[in-house]
Image (cartoon, rainbow, N blue to C red):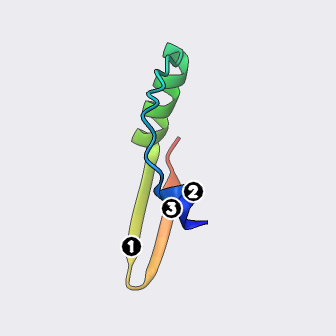
Amino acid sequence: MAKIYSDYTLKKIQLNPKKETVYFLLNYSKALRVNYYKSLEFVTLLN
């Protein structure tokens, strides 16, 4: 199993996402907030 993850590949895959996909991910990351209180973690999505 370790051999599968440690193999180095020379393949380079060029990804060409749509503009809508990029904007969706950027807006999602802007709205995502992670708050910590003592040993608790609160993940919120602000709309």
Q: Amino acid at mark 1?
A: Tyr
Give how far across and how far down residue 5 sits, in percent.
52, 57
40 up-or-down from 4: above or below: below
Q: Residue at x 39, y 78 (%)?
A: 37
Q: Label for residue 36?
A: 1
Q: Nearer the viewer, residue 43 or 11?
A: 11
Looking at the rendered structure, the secondary structure element under dot 1 is strand
Q: Earlier in the sequence, mark 3 or mark 1?
A: 1
Q: Amino acid at mark 3?
A: Val
What residue would you read off at disc 3?
A: 43
Q: Residue at x 50, y 61 (%)?
A: 43
Q: Quadrant of residue 29?
A: top left
Q: Nearer the viewer, mark 3 or mark 2?
A: 2
Q: Residue at x 42, y 61 (%)?
A: 34
Q: Quadrant of the N terminus?
A: bottom right
What residue would you read off at disc 2?
A: 4
Distance of label 1 from label 2 (alpha carbons): 36 Å
